Image (cartoon, rainbow, N blue to C red):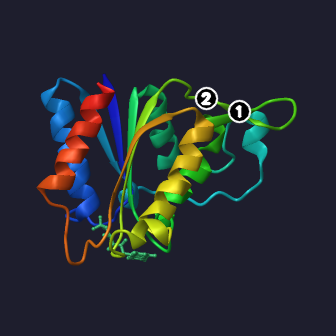
Amino acid sequence: MNILIINGSPRIHGNISAMLDAIREEAEQRGAEVTTVLASRLQVKPCTGCMTCRETHHCVLPEDDAQCVLAAIKSCDVLVVGAPCYWGNMPGQLKIIFDRIVYGMIGEDTRGLPLPLHKGKKAILISTSTTPFPFNILFGQSRGAIKAMREILKWSGFKVVSAIELGGTRQHPAGEKVLNRCRKAIKKCM
Ligand SMILES: Cc1cc2nc3c(=O)[nH]c(=O)nc-3n(C[C@H](O)[C@H](O)[C@H](O)COP(=O)(O)O)c2cc1C
């Protein structure tokens, strides 16, 4: 089984990274092939909005790391995306990647409605925020990031099996309780 982890946090020793590490370790122990991508380390130019890719299924910009991420998404069985809440959404670096690979995530039917290209694949979403529970959910903080990522994966055909949110990270960084939830989530996908 191929598992792709996309880490949308620029903090390699942060909360999202710890949660994604727990997932990677659990998956590897169970014999999965795990690839991890650090969004903040990639060279990806922002989408120019030309819409050409909707017709040609190819991006007009010079090839960069966006195509590597798309190739990895195409060959994975399970996709795990972790992103801290930045302004109630995912960090910009991660959003830029998804914008650049839209043509490899969805097609379009004759009415212009999206056609999912990854139907049947499972996904796990992870988010964190300094806003503590329950306000991280009620005020759309970690919940906002989850909602934005869910939107992309849903239309692309992924089934989001688990969405894990950790609020109040300044007072309570990721501990065993949430790490165990992450381990359980990947077990469910295997
Ligand atoms: C640019 C920026 C914007 C942020 N926006 C929010 C926000 O809107 N709401 C919130 O609760 N926390 C916000 N945070 C805090 C992060 O979500 C929080 O520190 C999170 O735990 C970081 O996760 P990490 O340790 O995995 O990087 C923001 C942090 C940064 C750097």
Residue located at (59% from left, 36% from top): 156
Asked whether 61 or 140 is in front, the reply is: 140
On screen, residue 43 versus residue 173, left or right, reads right
Give the x, y percent position of residue 162: 38, 41
- 147 or 83: which is nearer to us? 147
Q: What's the residue type where badge 1 is placed?
A: Gly
Circle 2 crowding by C-alpha within 10 Å: few under 14, some 14–19, many from 20: some
> Residue 33, percent across and down?
25, 28
* Residue 135 coordinates in the image, percent (x, y): 41, 73
- The dot on residue 117 is 2
Is 140 placed left or right of 23 in the picture? right
Q: Quadrant of residue 122?
A: top left
Q: CA distance from mark 1 to mark 2?
A: 7 Å
Q: Are marks 1 and 2 in contact (CB under 8 Å)?
A: yes
| Mark 1 sits near ligand 1, with its Cβ under 8 Å away | no
Q: Residue at x 28, y 58 (%)?
A: 16
Q: Amino acid at mark 2?
A: Leu
Instruction: Name the residue nearer the viewer: 86 or 159.
Output: 159
Residue visible at 47% across and 55% down in the picture: 146
- Tally of marks: 2
Mark positioned earlier in the residue sequence (1 or 2): 1
Image quadrant containing the C terminus: top left
For ligand 1, the image quadrant comes to bottom left
Judged from this view, the residue extending furthest toward the right is 111
* Residue where numbered disc 1 is placed: 107
Vertical placement of residue 76 versus 99, above or below: above
Question: Quadrant where the N terminus lies?
Answer: top left
Residue 57: percent from left, percent from top: 70, 34
Q: Quick one: SS at disc 2?
A: loop
Element under disc 1: strand
